[in-house]
Amino acid sequence: MYVCGPTVDNSPHLGHGRLAIVFDLLRRHLERRGVEVVMVQNITDVDDKIIDRARRSGMSPVEVAREFEAAWFSALDRLGILRPTKSPRATEWISQMIGMIVEMIDSGSAYRISDGVYLSVDRVEGYPRLSRQDREELLAGARVEVLEEKRSPLDFALWKLVGAEEYGFESPWGWGRPGWHTECVAMSLGLLGEGFDLHGGGMDLVFPHHENEWAQASVLGKRFCRHWMHNGLVEMGGEKMSKSIGNTMSLTEALDRYGARPLRLAYLRAQYRSPLEMGEPVLEESERALERIDDFIRRAQGAEPAVPTPKIEEFATALDDDLDTPRAFAVLFEAVRAGNIALDTGESERARYLADSVAGMLGWVGIGTERLVLSDEVKDLVTRRERAKAERDYATADQIRSHLGEMGYLLKDTRDGPVISRA
Ligand SMILES: [Zn+2]
């Protein structure tokens, strides 16, 4: 699969996190189902936004791009996203892009004008195909900012000529930079070959980016991807997240405030194609939901080990159906509910079996269970407190509990004994 990656001009925000989570989910699910996955995700490291930022900050475009590429990987590592098999940078594929553009000019599908090279959409069968828009309407909208020399207002740049003092690359048409839509065609076909299985990205990439990628592959006579998959966008306060409205949150900030697991759960509870509201209430609700799951697993841990294999097939089957995470998580929460009832009615073996199942489901989608590794000091404090309680020395017991609190641990007494978690 080829998934369009970030333009590295800024730190990743919550919208980028969703893209990463959705395709990480698809990859993990396919791998669990025995499918070998090769995932390519590009890094767009040449772009006007990167160059603007470089100009403002006194850095070079390459320095800006490397800094935010590192920020991208570090945020995604924290979120628990598997690294792509390959992460090619656009700037490392310039010669392949030039080769493609030469071919498109030679076949009469692309042409050179004063400011660059353009693809002639009239040469593309059925354009626009992917976004299924009305061509006349598109034309009407595009005429406003039309460049006289373009054959059609819908024609898009494959190569943009820039001044010699600007960041750019040598080409047969002069110093310039590639158009954004060209890099993904070069890298996807170059690394995965014709007719690769799946091309993914955010819903906002359908037009023009993916439409125009497909247009290039088609005039090159190449079979492109067999499937397209697009994830819905993230909203905050009921509106699409955007810098102009100011309703964005950086992924790092969200990770600092909530941690990776509640964040992953919040992303996954919506089906990947629907819009997703990601404000504070959603993240706090996700924190509470995860607490319920963790509490149950902790309570069941002392129970008899389960004999049968944990039941995760129902969960996985829901994911087989276009990654139906709402249905999958309904199965999970039902298991938590049934497991808590089993604990309350003393069916400890069944509780343990359900806890193992829930842990298996979480693991399937990369959330993982919280396993606390306790220091000897903490274990000793818990033992001393149990002893104090047995001796009815409640003052000491309370003192130890608040001491544990100061150390960042929450201690709860349950019918199965003391349960400790991160406060
Ligand atoms: Zn792309």
Image (tube, rainbow, N blue to C red):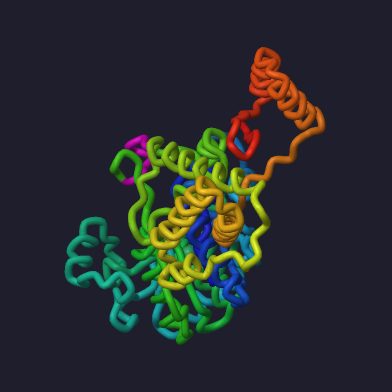
**Is residue 241 inside the magenta stretch?**
yes
Relative image position of residue 83 (x, y in whole percent): 64, 59
Q: Nearer the viewer, residue 420 or 133?
A: 420
Left or right, 275 with reference to 358: left
**Magenta region, residue range:** 240-247
**Is residue 394 inside the magenta stretch?**
no
Q: Nearer the viewer, residue 175 or 101?
A: 101
Left or right, 218 with reference to 69: left
Relative image position of residue 58 (x, y in whole percent): 59, 35
Kindly identify the residue that appears in the image at 44 percent across and 60 percent down.
331
Q: Which image quarter holds the C terminus?
A: top right
Q: Nearer the viewer, residue 369 or 219?
A: 369
Relative image position of residue 397 (x, y in whole percent): 68, 19
> Would you place residue 374 above or below residue 126 in this image?
above
Residue 202 appears anywhere in the view: no
Kindly identify the residue that appears in the image at 32 percent across and 46 percent down.
240
Kindly identify the residue that appears in the image at 66 percent across and 46 percent down.
302
> Would you place residue 196 above or below residue 87 in this image?
below
